[in-house]
């Protein structure tokens, strides 16, 4: 069968239909008390407590006291479950209905909320991105981010590009932080000891003649201690928003009056 409807509108993927509640009731006599929401919430609990690798249809079924095949009446495949898990973990966006902030404060608040979600549910970073946002909460987050830019002089495609830029920064910073944290845990190194150990190793191998810039960092004490992760996040986010502010200023200056 063709992947489009009679009107040539692309058909919704099964996970998206499930997320929007566009499916009929589960066939073949669903188990009493078992719902799609309960299945997804159980999977999120498992991922939060044990990591994404622990999530399987069998493991979720056990968590709910149900048979594995009963889950397939609600969720067609694990990939579908992962899509629903991410949407549930994100929940509603942070600033719905709040128009009191200017674009920069609003977008910064939005970025911090995005980072907070990824810190609470770091397994989200391991779920492959299958395409643009289309689930209810992901579209609500996109709408909320775009709303922050509504009164700026940016063109509509530029507003979307700004959201992609900010989400890319947040995701990359969150992934880097999660990987460093996991690396220190695996190596048995306390986070406060990481930088002092790293400094000693760099000083040992970085010859001043070949690595003069690195040695200037060493001499300045930059590697003596780890920076606060929040400070690092603020520094990067502010530089991103500085660039957006410059573009907004330029668009406002050249826009027809």
Image (cartoon, grey):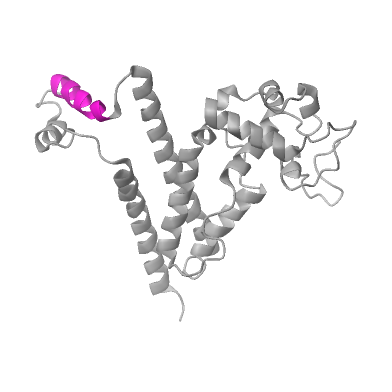
- Residue 83 in view here: no
State the residue lying farthest toward the right.
28
- Residue 247 in view here: yes
**Is residue 97 positioned above or below 184 on the image?**
below
The residue shown at (13%, 32%) is 218
**Left or right of residue 241, residue 190 in this image:** left
**Is residue 116 positioned above or below 176 on the image?**
below
Q: Position of residue 120 (x, y in %)?
A: 48, 39
Which quadrant of the figure has residue 144?
bottom right
Q: Is residue 204 within the magenta segment?
A: yes
Q: How many marks?
A: 0
Q: Is residue 144 within the magenta segment?
A: no
Q: Position of residue 217 (x, y in %)?
A: 15, 35
Q: Position of residue 48 (x, y in %)?
A: 54, 32
Which quadrant of the figure has residue 57?
top right
Quarter occupied by the N terminus: top right
> Which stretch appears magenta?
192-205
């Amino acid at each position: 069968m063709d992947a489009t409807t009679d009107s040539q509108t692309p058909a919704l993927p099964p996970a998206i239909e499930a997320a929007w509640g566009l499916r009929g009731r589960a066939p073949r006599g669903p188990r009493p008390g078992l719902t799609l929401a309960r299945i997804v919430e159980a999977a999120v609990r498992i991922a939060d407590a044990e990591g994404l690798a622990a999530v399987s249809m069998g493991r979720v079924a056990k968590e709910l006291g149900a048979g594995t095949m009963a889950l397939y009446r609600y969720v067609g495949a694990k990939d579908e479950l992962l899509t629903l898990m991410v949407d549930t973990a994100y929940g509603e966006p942070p600033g719905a209905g709040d128009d009191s902030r200017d674009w920069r404060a609003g977008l910064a608040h939005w970025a911090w909320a995005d980072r907070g979600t990824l810190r609470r549910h770091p397994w989200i970073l391991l779920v492959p991105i299958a395409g643009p946002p289309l689930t209810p909460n992901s579209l609500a987050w996109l709408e909320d981010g775009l709303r922050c830019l509504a009164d700026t002089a940016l063109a509509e495609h530029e507003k979307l590009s700004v959201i992609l830029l900010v989400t890319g920064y947040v995701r990359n910073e969150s992934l880097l932080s999660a990987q460093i944290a996991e690396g220190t845990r695996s190596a048995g190194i306390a986070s406060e000891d990481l930088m002092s150990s790293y400094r000693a190793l760099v000083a040992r191998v970085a010859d001043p003649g070949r690595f003069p810039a690195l040695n200037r960092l060493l001499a300045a004490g930059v590697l003596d201690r780890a920076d606060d992760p929040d400070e690092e996040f603020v520094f990067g986010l502010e530089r991103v928003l500085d660039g957006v502010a410059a573009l907004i200023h330029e668009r406002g200056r050249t826009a027809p009056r």
